[in-house]
Image (cartoon, rainbow, N blue to C red):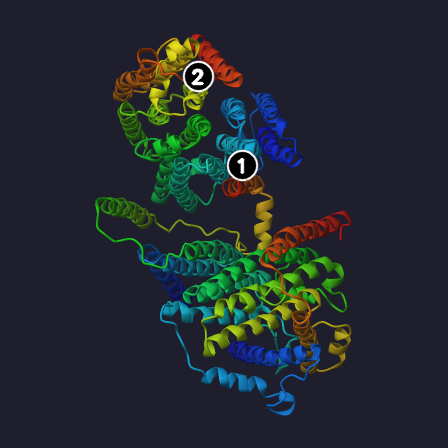
Amino acid sequence: MEIILFKAILVLVLFLISLGIAAYSTYAERKVAAFLQDRIGPDRAGPFGLLQPIADGVKMFLKEEIIPNHSNRWLFILGPCIFMLTALMTSAVIPWGMPLEFNGTKYALQVADINIGILYIMGVLSVGVYGIMIGGWASNNKYALLGAIRGSSQMISYELAMGMSIISILLISDGSLSLSHIVESQKGMNWNVFYQPLGFLIFLICAFAEANRTPFDLPESESELIGGYHTEYSSMKLGLFLFAEYINMFISSTVISCLYFGGYQFPGLEYLSAHLPANLVSVISIGALFTKVFFFIFFFMWVRWTIPRFRYDQLMRLGWQVLLPLSIANMLITGGVITFFNL
Amino acid sequence: MESTIVFYLLSALSVISALFVVFSRSPIYSVLSLIVCFFTIAGHYIMLNAQFLAIIHIIVYAGAIMVLMLFTVMLLNLNKELGTHKFNLTKLMAVITGGLMFLVIIASVKSSSLANYQAPAYLNIGNAEDIGMKLFTDYLLPFEISSVLFVSAMISAVLLAKKEVK
Amino acid sequence: MNTLIYTSVLGFGLMVLEVLKLRKWISPAIILGLSLIFGINIHDWNQPGSYMGNMLEISNFTVAFNALAIFITLLIAMLASEYYSDEEHHISDYMAIMTFVLCGAQMMLGYANLVLFFIGIETLSISLYALSGSKRFDAKSNEAGFKYFLMGSFASGFLLFGIALMYGATQSFDLNKLAEYAMGTSVSPLFLTGLLLVLFALFFKVSAAPFHFWAPDVYEGAPSIITAFMSTLVKVVGFAAFYKFLHVFGYLIPVKFDWLITLVAILSLVTGNLSALAQENFKRLMAYSGISHAGYLLIGLVGAAAFPSSAILYYGLGYSLSTIGAFAIAMAVFKSTGSESISAFNGLGKKNPVLAACLTATMLGLAGIPPFAGFFGKFYIFSEAIQNGHFYLVLVGILSSMIGIYYYMKVVIAMYAKPANETKIEISLTNQLVMWLCLVLVLLIGIMPSLVTGLF
């Protein structure tokens, strides 16, 4: 019973953290942009503009909600819901830190330690396409449809290379598909990124494409498609789309940290867990994970304000003709090295 | 007990969504309910402790194939409700044949007893590792030879879709 | 086992040749390769064995039908090198897909496990769907490809469902285990339903009535070379697979499906022959003739005395050779006249007596007139059926072969009795070679049937 209660609380906390991080990502994005462009950025609401996301949220809620006459009403509402749902679902399999301890019982900081963790993430990602597609199609607007089709074909294409680079990780981490195993196998500084630099690069690029971030933000490229698949959306439904994108970015950063940068592991964790109380270690490990995550969120933003957008054919060529062959080669080389050197 | 309830719930959902695929007049709703149907089937896999199959089912069917279906429906702009549901001879015959087939299957399921059914001794079917072991030992030949099938299908697709070089 | 491996390697090799820009070597490569594979296959004669955990089983039955399948593909590849000579940039695709069809055929011939059987049937079918739709700017070809694909998918669905039910009843895909189960005392109704569904799928694949509705349209719309390929290889291989399947189950299970096969055989004979009477298009005529030949072969399946029966091999050989010979001539005529109807043959007897004589010979062979192989094929099948007491079935068979003579004669009459038109008929050397090869072989095994019937 207690374990169920704990999991429920964990889910709730994760939900809130995701939303909070998404909200403050918008703020961070504007601040980073301002910094990179030598501006000040939002500074009116609260000290340093810290209350800006809340003001934005309030604005979103208070706007008039418009459902276009010619749209398909149910699907129009369903689209953003699915997108948000899938964005939030991924966090279930991520190990967030060392276990907490209450009354002598250990509680793992992971909602579900299923033995197919990575595949679960891939599955949720592939289902996330539907949110964009349904939303874009239901708007009954050519720009929205184009954006939706661009978005979904881009996501499908980059999923392949992503999956292939994940296979190389499975090869070097005892073949377990469970994320907690993968994180545990990267004890100390034994991070996968050192063994899989190419795989990491491919995964990172694919993560950008999956999250629809610049330089791959063609689905919503405002200069040609107005707003892409969310052209017709307004008020909180638009908010859901935007929020979900930031949550996706957060989750992508988390997955990258877990797969390639040891998740909550850091050098000296074993020493600490031997000498400090379990709960403190747990909090420190969570901090370690979030440091990595925040770095990658920053990286996402950094790239966005540095690299221009791709053209669509370039995007497809990169995905199918460069990344996919490279990731297959990476997988073969990894397998070959393991076989020949009996690692 | 809970699992029985879940089973019946999932089964009801599968059947209803499958029926909706057939009876819906709008292609897009058909596709969407087919996706729901796939999810319920994935649920059945999970009930059978085959998580790997469940997730692969979702990735392959819901995540890839149905997206392509949705693409087709959207690009052909089949927004309008198609198909007049008139009751003509073809339909009558289809109903009769389909119904007979249904009857045969119901009858055979009903008259086969589960008493002497033994669950397979091998319980770890759901693991990726075990599936891999099976594929690379007992089913090595079909596994490898299906690459011929896929290559052939790929060449065929290219053959049919490639821009004609003049 | 080696045959299958080398055939797949050949298919991949053809694509490599295309990548290496050695396009003009593709046709020689496939002909040479298939000849080598033929030899490799013959090498397995009298060396039965099962491979890969009893997935694939090599017996004399498999080797003999494999040899037939490889030979058919070889002939078709020779014709194809001529047929596709003006479509250079696609030739590797066509040739590779044909080789993969052969791969599928070999899986269907050697399966000892239903999983391999399914993969084989799919490899064969999916490749053929694309091939029959491969004339992309021809609406009829598109229709053919699409129709074949839709109907074929249904049949595959039935097949898969049937296999699943059988697996549900027995928890095995292995043919031996399934047969063991079928011979046991308590056979689950699920198993029988599954068996029935698999039978339906097989009926579809060999285009037996009433599962034949796709055949005329597909045969008509597909490129002629593919029609020739489908009507020979798929039919023969389908029947061989069917035969193997029946031999494992059909004769063993308590509730026999003999009546069902008998019914389908009679329906095929009647529908095929009667519908063929009204056809004006040569390829449609061949489609209905194919349906009626499916009927004869089904008589062979019902009445087969022992496994393996050489009657079916003999019939398949005679039928395939006659059909390919006829198509070798017909394709030249179609190309010269630009028409595919029977009237395209008008006056061929005056314009090109040799061709007309050869086509007459193949038609007579198909109709079953001695001394061609068609006659002895029917003779063996009928006599085996009579020995097993299927008297009425044989009666229907004989009656329908009489009808058959009438519509095969339609082509012959067109050639000799109808006035000639101006178009000159040109036939290439390759087509002539294939034609003579087929004709000589049909005559040879017609005169000396023991060459084939003595095999097993």
Instruction: Report x, y in % for residue C348.
Output: 38, 13
Which amino acid type corresponds to the residue marked 2 in the rendered image?
A: Ile
Q: Is residue C278 left or right of residue A311?
A: left
Q: What is the chain identity of the residue bearing mark 2?
A: C
Q: Nearer the viewer, residue A53 or B9?
A: A53
Per the image, label 2 sits on a secondary structure element best described as: loop
Q: Can you tell which mark lies on residue A208? A: none
Q: Nearer the viewer, residue C239 or A127?
A: A127
**Residue C322: image x %, image y %?**
42, 18
The total of numbered circles placed on residues is: 2
Residue depth check, mark 1 versus mark 2: number of the one nearer the observer: 2
- Quadrant where the N terminus of chain C lies? top right
| Cα–Cα gap, marks 1 and 2 | 49 Å
Answer with mark 1 or mark 2, whichever residue precedes in sequence.
1
Q: Are marks 1 and 2 in contact (CB under 8 Å)?
A: no
Q: Secondary structure at mark 1?
A: loop
Residue occupied by mark 2: C425
The x, y position of residue A28, in whole percent, is 64, 80
> Which of the 4 image quadrants contains residue A97?
bottom right
* Left or right: residue B100 compared with residue C96: left
Q: Residues within 10 Å of mark 2 (few under 14, many from 20)?
A: some
Residue visible at 37% across and 51% down in the picture: B114
Decide if residue C387 is on the left or right side of residue B50. left
Tell me the number on the disc at residue C55: 1
